[in-house]
Image (cartoon, rainbow, N blue to C red):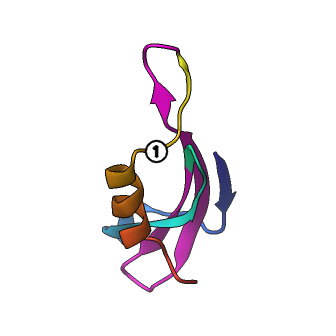
Amino acid sequence: TSVDFRSGLVQDDDQIDVSVEVVRIGSSSVTTRETITALSDGRIAAVAESVMVHCDEARSAAAPFGDDARALLEGVLSQQ
């Protein structure tokens, strides 16, 4: 996970929006981007990128996504 902190948030910001996008799909991993935005003025407070690996519990090792899981992830893949 990496985080780019862009702006601080304070109590007066009151509410935030957190969006999550799937930006890349590998054979056994998925990369997401999380953006935290202050609703008070639209200011982006932070952008994070996370890589998660699908594992085979029996082997405790990375395992390719099944067809159903891959189709689900591809359905929400960001086109940016």
Residue 65 screen position, x and y as percent: 46, 44
Q: Please determine whether, in this image, residue 75 is positioned above or below residue 29.
A: below
Q: Please determine whether, in this image, residue 1 is positioned above or below residue 17.
A: above
Q: Secondary structure under badge 1? A: loop
Prevalent SS, magenta region: strand
Observer-nearest residue: 11 or 70? 70
Residue 27 screen position, x and y as percent: 59, 49
Residue linked to disc 1: 65
Assess disc 1: are there few (<14), some (14-19) or many (≥20) residues with their C-alpha within 10 Å of its C-alpha: many
Does 78 appear in magenta?
A: no
Name the image quarter holding residue 42: bottom left
Q: Residue furthest front?
A: 67
Relative placement, left or right, of 71 versus 26 is left
Relative placement, left or right, of 68 versus 28 is left
Q: Please determine whether, in this image, residue 80 is positioned above or below residue 75.
A: below
Residue 53 screen position, x and y as percent: 55, 38
Q: How many marks?
A: 1
Does 43 appear in magenta?
A: yes
Observer-nearest residue: 50 or 71? 71
Q: Residue at x 52, y 80 (%)?
A: 43
The region drawn magenta spans 30-59
Q: Residue at x 52, y 40 (%)?
A: 64
Q: Please determine whether, in this image, residue 57 is positioned above or below residue 37.
A: above
Residue 9 screen position, x and y as percent: 49, 63
Q: Residue at x 54, y 42 (%)?
A: 52
Q: Amino acid at mark 1?
A: Phe
